[in-house]
Image: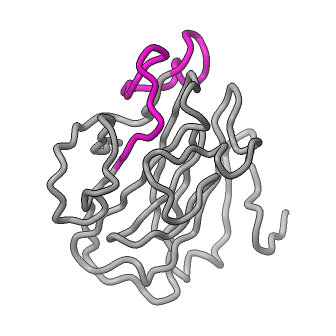
Amino acid sequence: ENWDYYADGSLDNADWRSASNKVKWQNGQAPFGYGNSGRYMDTYSKTKVGSTNNKKICVYFRKTFTLKEAPKADDVFRFSYIVDDGFRVHVNGQDVGGYHLYEGDGYSVNTESHDGSWYEGDTPGEGFIDIPAKYFQKGENVIAVDVHNCNNTSSDLFFDASLVQISTSEQDAEFVSEDPVFEMPSEGDFELE
């Protein structure tokens, strides 16, 4: 999946989260990142957004997509991520969640600024955020993500994500996994058969 990205400094004073931004984006295929040779972040990055000699404290990503219909009020959009070290996600200009960062954190904030243990080691963190339908609209939508490193000397950075709309009727449906290993979601009630 392709995303637009910007890895050339701060966008704190730019309107990079909205549809009408004026940023000169590059485009690349996910996953994005860099790291020490042979390690996860280096091996699995399809688009390099830095290097161990050109470290990045923050890289910005965005994607525009169209919804043919307005989502139902109780639909959710699942933002699944793999990241090193933290991020904030925005939908149509609104901050809707993150991992290892707080709302309003700017370019120079790294994840260890908040907690010395907020970093990923040799493999990135994985998870998801369920985003309420109220942030989405019929027509054009923008999802924007700022990925931050743990500190200014970190040797790696990684980002991959997907967004899936889950309608209320699908939330109660049976789920069958053909994967040999399946990680159960951390929330909700489940019945295993």
- Where does residue 107 sit, x and y in percent of width and height? 43, 48
- Location of residue 9 (image quadrant): top left
**Badge count:** 0
The correct choice, above or below, for 151 with respect to 156 in the image is below
- The residue at 56%/75% (across/down) is 170
Residue farthest to the bottom, as pictured: 73
- Judging depth in this view, the residue of 7 and 175 nearest the camera is 7
Residue shown at the point (27%, 62%) measured from the top left: 65
Colour pattern of the rendering: one colour
In this orientation, which residue lies closer to the viewer: 93 or 133?
93
- Reply yes or no: does residue 178 show up in magenta: no
Q: Nearer the viewer, residue 123 or 25?
A: 25
For the record, the magenta segment spans: 35-61
Which residue shows up at 16% across the image and 44% down it? Answer: 24
The location of residue 186, given as percent across then percent down, is 77, 62
Residue 48 is drawn in which quadrant?
top left
* Horizontal side, residue 118 vs residue 31: left or right: right
Asked if residue 154 is positioned above or below residue 25 in the image, the reply reads above
User: In the orientation shown, which residue stands out farthest toward the top?
Assistant: 37
User: Relative to 128, is 91 on the left or the right?
Assistant: left
* Image quarter hosting the N terminus: top left
Quadrant occupied by the C terminus: bottom right
Judge left or right: residue 119 versus residue 34.
right
- In the image, residue 49 lies in the stretch drawn in magenta: yes
Decide: is 180 above or below 145.
above
Q: Position of residue 109 (x, y in %)?
A: 53, 48
Task: Please give the name of the residue rendered at 22% of the width and 37% of the height, measured from the top-left corner.
Answer: 26
x, y (%) of residue 151? Answer: 59, 34
